[in-house]
């Protein structure tokens, strides 16, 4: 099956974005404080930071799920106002539709795009194969392991052919071994379909392994502390033994460490 | 992490009360408007103000307190009986295999069956006065209590029981000090289900048997086409039902202070 | 099969006690006919076409009232959860009527609709409407945000999200609420047939009781209980099928 011919990737521009979280009861909390960031075409950008620093909030703002009250977010030159299939999201807890089979989950986005039936089926099966789940098309999410569920979520999102991939700690709910395997799989998948990726994580090693650049965020309220280039390290499974890789991880961990401690103290 | 603070004390509580009563006020206004318009006749929907004045009349003359008191006494007596015996059976079922074996089919058939069908049986056995109403109520209300108690007691996290044993606690201690408190949330939920059932069944019993009590007087009003009387009865019963539900919620909050807090932290 | 028999074997014990107690004089046989006599009465009832006339009347009211309540209740509950204006309009009504014992509506129904079928259907409809609305509303509000976001991400419209995501995701809780409504519908059915009917199973019980035909009365009480039980079991089997994806 021919790969889609759409131009891969899409630049993201975030300028001066702030966000206040207003719970139904209690005080409002400033989650993001004038964050400015850019991700180039086909770049893999990791958002790294301690719990509560607002990195997921940043992702949801790009995704169009939260209203952008101050600042600007543009994807491929167009302002973000609402969710849409051009920015595909993969959630930490999979967000699969439990009453639909694997195949039906992957088909969902394709149905929304009103593709002809034969093409929908073909694409769905192709992406199920891409994530190595052939044979499980008729299974329900409840019957799958965590790793398998996440693969379905990835297949579902990729099938929508977004130019931007937004991933919210996608491997955070998996055990350590599955996580390693999924990281390798993701590298493989992305090697064949380049996209702009914004990847939220609190795992330093994961960020250096997968990303081209890593943006370190401070504890709440979230600001960009620094951005580190890691394109020359990582990218393959055995890269983690490379000395430069270890140095980069070490450097970033020290950068994050202070923020993590501050977050722990009860921000 | 700092605890989330709810809108402060008295101001917050008053605001929530206002919001809640807002619904009631909206309903009453709607009622009055509809009744005064010519869309429905006075017979079908008497004006709220007329109904309210009837209620006031009955309260002052002493009829309402008597009727209400009677109905509540029967409902609560039945409820109490169901509560005590139900919890007892539920705990037994959870801890004793023979008890579980014996009661299980009775409970699983009885729970979904319409117990009210037994009303003529209770009338046959216990006559037409308080006793039959109270026992009928207890019979209907006991099932949710048994089910909830058995589930709650059985479902106590075995690890906390093991912790207690580890600390050297004896069997009886563990039952009263660990298991029952741990099962309390579910037991109280069962009681919360049983309470409105008690009120419904008491009222139906009163309607069927006649005589004193809100159910009885409402049926009389219906037979005499006393529309205002019937609606007055509905309002009275609604208020009684509401008060009872709120009362048991209050008890739950007091008894389960620890439970509420863990819930709040989880939502943060 | 043996497991089934073992589970229900205490009932045999109870039946035995029911037989022995009145026969031996421990309990007054006039008040509690021995089990065998009740069973004989039940056999007589089952072959009597009159039973089926009454049963049909009861079940017809039951299904009509409950069915209407489910359709209207689910629709209203979900729409309330999703569209604020509807919620604001209907909420006061729901919050005030919910804590009220539904059987209090019986006298109103007698006044409004007399003693015919419509009165009972109306009663069951109104009584069951509320639990269904409340559970549908809670279910719809409780749908995980990420599921809705996933659908939005895929480009679904508001209406599509409502019918394709919110409704299926709410099904477990809705079906649970309908189960409660099912039990309630039987209670309201029997209560209303005690008070305002000229046919139906509840009416039969009252009629037999007043006529002193106690063996048939007990038999009918058991029958009605059995129907309530069977309906619940059948409903559970149905929900298990409908929610097979839960595994």
Image (tube, rainbow, N blue to C red):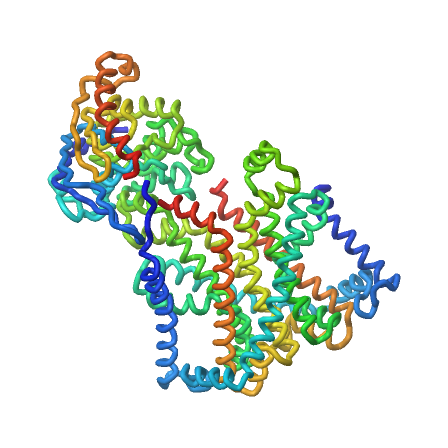
Residue A86 in view (yes/no): no
Q: Is residue A81 above or below residue A176?
A: below
Q: Residue at x 37, y 67 (%)?
A: C90
Q: Is residue C189 above or below residue A43?
A: below
Quadrant for residue B223, please give it.
bottom right
Q: In the picture provided, is A164 more to the left or to the right than B110?
A: left
Q: In the picture provided, is C183 more to the left or to the right than C38?
A: left
Q: Observer-nearest residue: A70 or C79?
A: A70
* Numbered marks: total: 0
Q: Where's the N terminus of chain A, which quadrant?
A: top left
Q: Residue at x 61, y 71 (%)?
A: B73
Residue B244 in view (yes/no): yes
Q: Residue at x 19, y 29 (%)?
A: A215
Q: Position of residue C190 (x, y in %)?
A: 62, 69
Q: Position of residue B165 (x, y in %)?
A: 60, 34
Q: Position of residue C161 (x, y in %)?
A: 32, 51
Q: Where's the C terminus of chain A, which quadrant?
A: top left
Q: Position of residue A151 (x, y in %)?
A: 36, 31
């Amino acid at each position: 099956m021919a790969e889609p011919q759409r131009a891969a990737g899409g630049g993201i521009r975030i300028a001066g974005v702030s966000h206040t979280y207003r719970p139904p009861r209690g005080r409002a909390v400033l989650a993001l404080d004038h964050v400015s960031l850019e991700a180039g075409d086909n770049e893999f950008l990791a958002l790294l930071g301690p719990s509560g620093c607002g990195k997921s909030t940043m992702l949801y703002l790009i995704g169009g799920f939260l209203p952008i009250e101050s600042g600007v977010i543009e994807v491929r030159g167009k302002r973000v106002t609402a969710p849409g299939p051009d920015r595909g999201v993969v959630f930490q807890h999979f967000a699969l539709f439990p009453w639909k089979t694997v195949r039906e989950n992957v088909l969902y986005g394709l149905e929304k795009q009103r593709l002809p039936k034969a093409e929908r089926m073909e694409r769905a099966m192709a992406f199920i194969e891409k994530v190595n789940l052939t044979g499980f098309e008729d299974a329900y999410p409840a019957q799958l392991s965590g790793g398998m569920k996440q693969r379905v979520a990835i297949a579902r999102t990729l099938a929508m052919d977004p130019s931007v991939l937004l991933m919210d700690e996608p491997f955070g709910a998996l055990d350590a071994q599955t996580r390693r395997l999924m990281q390798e799989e993701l590298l493989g998948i992305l090697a064949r379909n380049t996209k702009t990726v914004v990847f939220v994580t609190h795992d330093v090693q994961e960020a250096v392994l997968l990303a081209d650049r890593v943006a370190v965020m401070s504890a709440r309220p979230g600001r960009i502390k620094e951005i580190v280039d890691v394109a020359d390290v990582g990218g393959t499974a055995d890269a983690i033994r490379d000395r430069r890789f270890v140095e980069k991880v070490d450097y970033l961990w020290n950068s994050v460490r202070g923020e993590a401690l501050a977050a722990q103290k009860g921000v | 992490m700092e605890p989330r603070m709810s809108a402060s004390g008295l101001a917050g509580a008053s605001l929530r009360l206002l919001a809640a009563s807002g619904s009631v006020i909206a309903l009453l206004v709607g009622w009055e408007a509809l009744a005064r318009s010519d869309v429905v006749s006075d017979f079908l929907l008497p004006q709220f103000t007329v109904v309210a004045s009837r209620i006031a009349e009955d309260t002052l003359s002493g009829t309402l307190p008597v009727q209400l008191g009677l109905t509540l006494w029967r409902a609560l007596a039945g409820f109490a009986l169901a509560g005590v015996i139900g919890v007892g059976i539920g705990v037994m079922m959870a801890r004793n295999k023979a008890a579980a074996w014996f009661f299980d089919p009775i409970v699983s058939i009885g729970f979904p069956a319409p117990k009210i069908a037994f009303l003529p049986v209770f009338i046959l056995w216990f006559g037409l006065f308080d006793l039959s109403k109270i026992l009928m109520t207890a019979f209907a209300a006991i099932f949710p209590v048994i089910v909830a108690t058995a589930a709650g007691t059985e479902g106590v996290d075995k690890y906390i029981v093991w912790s207690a044993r580890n600390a050297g606690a004896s069997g009886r201690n563990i039952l009263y000090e660990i298991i029952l408190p741990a099962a309390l949330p579910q037991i109280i939920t069962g009681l919360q289900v049983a309470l409105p059932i008690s009120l419904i069944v008491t009222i139906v019993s009163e309607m069927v048997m006649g005589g004193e009590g809100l159910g009885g007087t409402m049926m009389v009003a219906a037979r005499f086409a006393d529309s205002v009387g019937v609606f007055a009865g509905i309002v009275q019963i609604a208020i009684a039902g509401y008060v009872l539900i709120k009362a048991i919620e209050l008890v739950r909050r007091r008894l389960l202070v620890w439970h509420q807090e863990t819930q709040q932290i989880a939502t943060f | 099969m043996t497991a089934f028999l073992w589970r229900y074997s205490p009932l045999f014990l109870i039946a035995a006690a029911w037989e022995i107690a009145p026969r031996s004089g421990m309990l007054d046989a006039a008040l509690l006919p021995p089990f065998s006599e009740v069973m004989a009465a039940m056999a007589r009832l089952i072959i009597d076409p009159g039973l089926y006339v009454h049963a049909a009347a009861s079940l017809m009211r039951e299904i009509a009232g409950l069915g209407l309540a489910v359709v209207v209740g689910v629709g209203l509950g979900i729409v309330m959860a999703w569209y604020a204006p509807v919620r604001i309009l209907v909420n006061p009504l729901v919050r005030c009527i919910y804590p009220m014992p539904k059987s209090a509506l019986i006298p109103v129904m007698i006044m409004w609709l007399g003693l015919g079928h419509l009165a009972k259907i109306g009663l069951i409809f109104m009584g069951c409407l509320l639990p269904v609305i409340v559970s549908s509303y809670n279910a719809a509000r409780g749908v995980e945000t990420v599921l809705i976001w996933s659908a939005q991400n895929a480009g679904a419209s508001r209406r599509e999200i409502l019918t394709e995501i919110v409704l299926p995701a709410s099904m477990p809780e809705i079906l649970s609420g309908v189960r409660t409504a099912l039990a309630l519908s039987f209670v309201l059915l029997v209560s209303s047939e005690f008070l305002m009917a000229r046919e139906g199973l509840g009416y039969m019980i009252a009629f037999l009781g007043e006529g002193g035909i106690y063996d048939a009365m007990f038999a009918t009480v058991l029958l009605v209980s059995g129907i309530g039980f069977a309906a619940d079991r059948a409903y559970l089997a149905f929900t298990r099928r409908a929610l097979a994806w839960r595994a």
